[in-house]
Amino acid sequence: MKKFFADVYREYKAFTGNKIYKIFRYVFTGIFTAYLLTIVFPQYLFAHDISYKNFRVYSNQPLDGNIERVLDLAGTRLEKSPIYDKELTERIFICDSFALYTFLSPTSRKAFANTLPSVGNIRIGMIDASRDLVFRNDQSDNQRSLSGVIAHEVTHNLIRKKFGLINSFTSLPNWKDEGYCEYVAGETTVSFAEGVRRWKENPNNESRYAYFKYHQMVKYLLDEEKISVEELFSRDFDEKELATKVFAKICQN
């Protein structure tokens, strides 16, 4: 047995000492490092950028006044949140194509947008600023307001800054995180009536209405029970019990 492992080790050393292997390793490491740096610092991929209030927006297409109107709408939504910080500069990268968006956000390629934790870069897919719309690469539920999505993604950054990056990943339930972001956005991808319909039809499978459900849960706590945002994130709640209560209430409307 010892001889077997000794032979395997010698073969491994001979293989890793091979010149072709070393070249391949260096090339692969270089490409991977360049990709990671691009994810963190993608500015060089974008030909245009503007600064407006506390937003810095990058795009491959010239940005006109419509984007400023969209940012104003997003700012109006954000200002309603007690954790909003106007002093923070938010970097938004408009990808203008699903291919570029997927390149920068491979794990969220079907989403409207994605925010890089710790760095805070907000990556957004294809948009139509004149109609305040953003699109995602899917067959259904594939458009919603751009201003709402920007408010949603900025709120992710605000939550991580206020309550801690590590806590947001280790102890913050998804329904609180996404639910509050949708609460600030003031909308979800589906309408209220459609969200209720999907919830009624599939009460045990939230895959097609999860964000709507989370939004309603947070909205109930903040608007009906009048708890504070601080309490929302600091208190422990029975998620199943809360969802049952919220479901019963919205079905009465």
Image: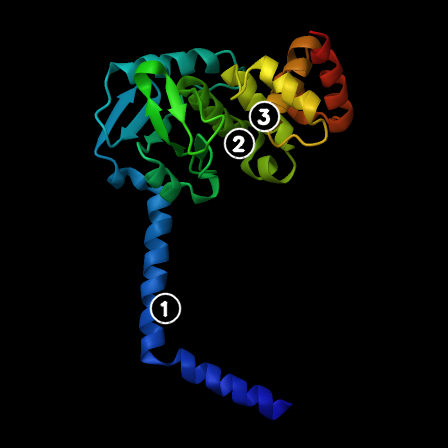
Q: Which residue is mark 3?
A: 211
Badge nearest the viewer, 2 or 1: 1
Q: Quadrant of residue 63?
A: top left
Q: Nearer the viewer, residue 243 or 228?
A: 243
The Cα–Cα distance between marks 2 and 3, rounded to whole angstroms, is 19 Å
Q: Quadrant of residue 3?
A: bottom right
Instruction: Say left or right for 154 vs 96.
Output: right
Q: Can see residue 218?
A: no
Q: Nearer the viewer, residue 162 or 43?
A: 43
Q: Does dot 2 land on a helix, a strand or a loop?
A: helix
- Horizontal and vertical percent position of residue 69: 32, 12
Q: Does dot 3 land on a helix, a strand or a loop?
A: helix
The tag earlier along the polypeptide, 2 or 1, is: 1
Instruction: Say left or right for 202 vs 185.
Output: right
Q: Which residue is mark 2?
A: 160
Q: Quadrant of residue 163?
A: top right
**Residue 126 shows which numbered tag?**
none
Q: Nearer the viewer, residue 251 or 117?
A: 251
Q: Does dot 1 land on a helix, a strand or a loop?
A: helix
The Cα–Cα distance between marks 2 and 1, rounded to whole angstroms, is 36 Å
75 shown above or below 22: above
- Horizontal and vertical percent position of residue 115: 45, 34
Q: Are marks 2 and 3 in contact (CB under 8 Å)?
A: no
The tag earlier along the polypeptide, 2 or 3, is: 2
The total number of labels drawn is 3
Q: Which residue is mark 1?
A: 25
